[in-house]
């Protein structure tokens, strides 16, 4: 070959780096822990592949038909005919991607349409779409509060909220999970003048518990703090219009963050607000500006899905029926659950340790059921959880089957008697 065309390759055997200067050495403990787990013969819970997805509630995993009870497809919109058609049409008309930032060439017709759909859904004057929910939190929190100001967050906040705080320059104050009293105490200790943002979540995704938003918002307002609520896990089925826990509890928050990756059934994130200066976020927010916008097919599916969620009363009822049936069934089987009542579409089973959690998870998977396994640091208080998240499309017969699977796996592993 022409020597000039031979491409440089990374060396197959890189020169060994002494461990003390190898930046990858910091992962040794993590690698060893993962190896020890896999050596016990279990399937890696963090390396599942969906070989086929048949519906919002069924997939093929490792060649086996499996019921999905661990996705955030709460409203089952991923296979909605109108949603799929909207995506295909946008793909045909606008191509596969935008090749640019929303600020420059990356705003297409469907980005405008999805922001309009969000304004209608939430009944607000402002909506800004981000590339993911993670980036919506990262962008909103780091842009809203700056040097000399304060961000106050629940200790059990999602990683994207923590990262948003880290990315900004504000002072970070944490309060005890869902404690109105601790929030009040900590706000009371801060100087009066600087701006403050209290960040809350409607539904906390690990245990599926909800926040006492009404009391918390009242406390925040008493201390002149603004409030941002992440309603990622409540959109579509909480509150009279499916806007979230804040709507259900009738409270006034300044900013709502949400995602398209759960009830909406695609990918993307957003913030909505009635603040008259809200649009200025687009001019200052780095995670909005310095990344490519969502593909037209994605925003087109999101816009259609959000419009349909506005009237999805039947699906909403079905989802709550499913949550009640599963929660009641698991409780009467003797499992320890994350919440006393079915507070949301997430039902978490608390297990003793990693070994018990993984063995139980594997037994369920082998029987044809997929749930999420969650472990520290994602979980509160060092807990190991099997998290079930329901879909409006689960049938009562599927829930019965699922309960049967939990009963036999729970008895085989010794979690229940
Ligand atoms: N907020 C919360 C509470 C979440 O649980 C998640 C994702 N699980 C996100 C934000 C991020 O959403 P996305 O998947 O769109 O990045």
Image (cartoon, grey):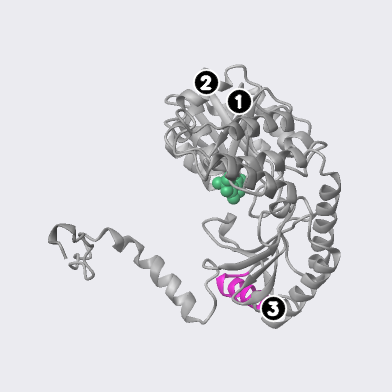
Q: CA distance from mark 3 to mark 2?
A: 52 Å
Number of marks in the rendered image: 3
Dot 2 crowding, Cα within 10 Å, few <14, some 14–19, many 20+: few
Q: Local crowd at mark 1 within 10 Å, few (<14), some, or many (≥20)?
A: some
Local SS, label 3: loop
Nearer to us in this view, 174 or 141: 141
Q: Is residue 110 left or right of residue 405?
A: left
Image disc number at residue 280: 2
**Residue 192: % across, % down:** 54, 19
User: In the rendering, at what x and y percent does residue 60 appear?
Assistant: 64, 71
Q: In this picture, which residue range is highlighted in magenta?
A: 352-364
Q: Is residue 91 left or right of residue 217?
A: left
**The C terminus, quarter of image:** bottom right
**In front: label 1 or label 2:** 2
Q: Give whichever of discs 3 and 1 has the lower sequence position.
A: 1
Q: Residue at x 51, y 40 (%)?
A: 135
Estimate the x, y position of residue 8 in percent, counting from the top left.
20, 59
- The reply to whether dot 1 and dot 2 touch (C-beta < 8 Å) is no
Secondary structure character of the magenta stretch overall? helix
Q: First in sequence: mark 3 or mark 2?
A: 2
Q: Quadrant of residue 365?
A: bottom right
The residue depicted at 84 percent of the width and 53 percent of the height is 318
Which badge, 1 or 2, is on the more N-terminal residue?
A: 1
Residue 241 visible, this orientation = yes
Mark 3, other Cα within 10 Å: few <14 / some 14–19 / many ≥20: some
Q: Which label is found at residue 226? A: 1
Tag 3 residue: 367
Q: Is residue 319 above or below residue 417?
A: above
- The reply to whether residue 182 is visible in this rendering is no
Asked if residue 263 lies in the magenta stretch, the reply is no
């Amino acid at each position: 070959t022409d020597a000039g065309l031979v491409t440089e390759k990374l060396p197959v055997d890189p020169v060994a780096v002494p461990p003390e200067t190898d930046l990858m050495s910091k992962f040794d403990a993590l690698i060893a822990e993962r190896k020890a787990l896999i050596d016990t013969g279990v399937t890696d819970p963090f390396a599942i592949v969906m070989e086929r997805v048949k519906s919002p509630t069924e997939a093929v995993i490792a060649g086996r038909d499996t019921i999905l009870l661990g996705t955030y497809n709460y409203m089952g919109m991923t296979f909605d005919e109108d949603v799929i058609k909207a995506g295909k049409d946008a793909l045909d008309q606008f191509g596969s991607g935008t090749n640019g930032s929303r600020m420059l060439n990356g705003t297409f017709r469907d980005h405008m349409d999805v922001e309009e759909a969000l304004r209608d859904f939430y009944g607000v004057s402002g909506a800004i779409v981000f590339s993911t929910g993670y980036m919506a939190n990262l962008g909103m929190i780091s842009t809203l509060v700056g040097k000399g100001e304060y961000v106050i967050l629940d200790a059990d906040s999602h990683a994207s909220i923590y990262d948003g705080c880290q990315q900004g320059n504000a002072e970070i104050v944490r309060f005890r999970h869902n404690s109105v009293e601790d929030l009040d105490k900590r706000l009371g200790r801060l100087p009066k003048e600087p701006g403050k943002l209290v960040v809350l979540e409607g539904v906390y995704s690990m245990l599926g518990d909800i926040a006492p938003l009404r009391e918390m918002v009242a406390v925040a307002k008493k201390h002149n703090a603004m409030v941002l609520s992440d309603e990622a896990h409540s959109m579509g089925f909480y509150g009279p219009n499916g806007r979230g826990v804040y709507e259900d509890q009738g409270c006034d928050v300044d900013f709502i963050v949400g995602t398209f990756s759960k009830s909406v059934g695609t990918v993307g994130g957003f913030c909505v607000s009635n603040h008259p200066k809200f649009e200025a976020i687009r001019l200052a927010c780095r995670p909005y500006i310095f990344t490519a916008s969502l593909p037209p097919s994605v925003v087109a599916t999101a816009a259609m899905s959000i419009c349909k969620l506005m009237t999805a009363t039947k699906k909403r009822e079905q989802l709550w029926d499913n949550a009640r049936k599963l929660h009641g069934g698991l409780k009467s089987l003797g499992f320890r659950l994350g919440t006393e009542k079915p507070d949301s579409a997430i039902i978490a089973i608390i297990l003793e340790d990693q070994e018990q959690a993984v063995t139980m998870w594997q037994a369920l998977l082998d029987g044809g059921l997929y749930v999420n396994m969650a472990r520290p640091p994602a979980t509160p208080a060092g807990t190991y959880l099997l998290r079930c998240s329901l879909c409006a499309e689960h049938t009562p017969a599927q829930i019965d089957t699922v309960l049967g699977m939990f009963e036999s796996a729970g008895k085989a592993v010794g979690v229940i008697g």
